[in-house]
Image (spheres, helix red, strand yellow):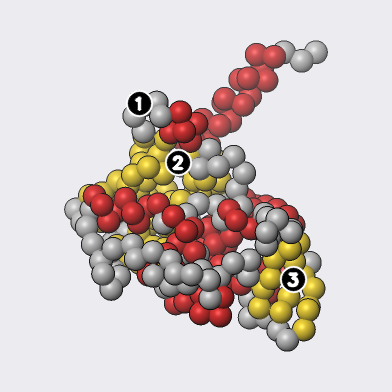
Amino acid sequence: MIDDARVTESIVNRFFEEFSDHTRIDVAIAGAGPAGLVAGRYLAEKGYQVAIFERKLSPGGGMWGGGMGYPVVVLQESSVEELEKVGVKTREEGDGYYTADSVSSVANLLSSAIDAGCRVFNMITVEDVLYEEGSVKGFVINSSPIETAGLHVDPITIRAEATIDATGHDAEVCNVVEEKAGELETEEGTVMGEKSMWAEVGEKTVVENTQEVFPGLWVTGMCANAVMGAPRMGPIFGGMLLSGKKVAELIDGEI
């Protein structure tokens, strides 16, 4: 016999038990794209309590659709190991190029992060930051459906020792910090905005630009290039993966 109320109780009890356990954490990440997932996995493997907050129903960012909806992504030789180590099958295409199925890539990146202990909360929007004594100390979050509906409902707060903006092109957290908290560590003190496509440069700078841009706030993935004013790079994802690894290494040395 299936008791419908018992089904409800099982869902509600487990969710709020897990959510309550993640209101004070080591690392909070906004955005569950490839860079955020890699960062979450590495940090969880090192023993940190990590939560990723993803505004959409489906984690994975822009990786699902490959290029123009063709479910294939490209990686360069220096980064292919980051997919293969989580079980993604890659194919060598010559001249240092590799391809992988985009759906398999997201599925494996997501599964490996969760298996490492990183908790992913979907349909949650980071709308502000917790700002104390000149530093970002966590995220202010709300339900994405509430935000989409434009309802006047107050958010709640997650406290964290370190925060990561992995929201991609929009650099959502950094834009909030610039507006409300102060200048960022960029040439102009602002979110400088991404430049047009130039994959060769973009793939290099997305790793170089992965850094702490405000006390307590790091950037990774396409967000790093958007904040620093570097080019976008389209459906080649090696830099994203390496950026996620780098931000985890930087935070591991700070908290």
Q: Which residue is mark 2?
A: 125
C-alpha separation, residue under disc 2 versus residue under disc 1:
14 Å
Q: Nearer the viewer's eye, disc 2 or disc 1?
A: 1
Q: Position of residue 111 (x, y in %)?
A: 67, 52
Mark 2 or mark 1, earlier in chain: 2
Residue shown at 60% from the left, 56% from the top: 62
Q: Secondary structure at mark 2?
A: strand
The part of the image, by quadrant, that contains residue 212 is: bottom left
Q: Secondary structure at mark 3?
A: strand
- Residue kind at label 2, given as amino acid type: Thr
Please tell me the numbered disc located at residue 102: none
Direction from residue 82 to residue 139 in the image, left or right: left
Quadrant of the image containing the C terminus: bottom left
Please tell me the numbered disc located at residue 152: 1
Please tell me the numbered disc located at residue 99: 3
Q: Position of residue 41 (x, y in %)?
A: 57, 59
Residue reaching furthest bottom? 95
The part of the image, by quadrant, that contains residue 163 is: bottom left
How busy is the neighbourhood of tag 1: few (under 14 within 10 Å), some, or many (20 plus)?
few
- Residue kind at label 3, given as amino acid type: Thr
- Does the residue at mark 3 contact the one at mark 1 (Cβ under 8 Å)? no
Residue shown at 29% from the left, 53% from the top: 177
**Can the viewer see residue 234?**
yes
